[in-house]
Image (cartoon, rainbow, N blue to C red):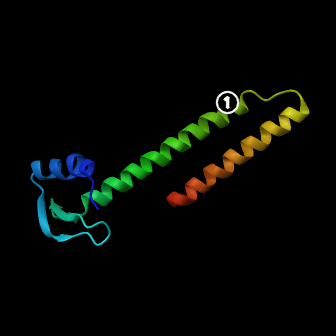
Amino acid sequence: MITDEEIRKVIAPLLLSGAKMLDKHCPKCGSPLFEKDGRVFCPVCEYREKQKKEMVKGVEERLMEKLTQLANSLPDDIDELEKHLRVMEKIIEVLEKYKKLEGRR
């Protein structure tokens, strides 16, 4: 189902830009399909995919920042160092999972 936000942010600007709304609907989300420059597409699915990628990218960036912080502040105490390294290892595992989700591996 299409949200009001998607209508405002995606569909209305497309109509104003001269895209043609077709009498066919997306089988995935039910949105009307559009045609522009010879390309038929679902603007809502494209918008949602873009939003998802931006969210994943934001999480990855925060994890990388934390990993860098940890790498730059390794403690001298061996017990604390082990804890530090375990956390770093977990962050790396999560980053790998995100990459697999995006099909980048």
Percent of width and height locating residue 98: 56, 53
Q: Quadrant of residue 71?
A: top right
Residue plotted at (52% across, 61% down): 103
Q: In the image, is 13 to the left or to the right of 102?
A: left
How packed is label 1: few (under 14 Cα within 10 Å), some, or many (20 or more)? few
Q: Is residue 38 above or below residue 70?
A: below
Q: Which residue is mark 1?
A: 69
Q: In the image, is 71 to the left or to the right of 47?
A: right
Q: In the image, is 12 to the left or to the right of 6?
A: left
Image quarter hosting the C terminus: bottom right
Q: Nearer the viewer, residue 80 or 68?
A: 80
Q: Is residue 89 above or below residue 70?
A: below
Residue plotted at (28% across, 57% down): 44
Q: Amino acid at mark 1?
A: Gln
Residue plotted at (74% across, 41% down): 87
Percent of width and height locating residue 51: 38, 49
Percent of width and height locating residue 25: 21, 70
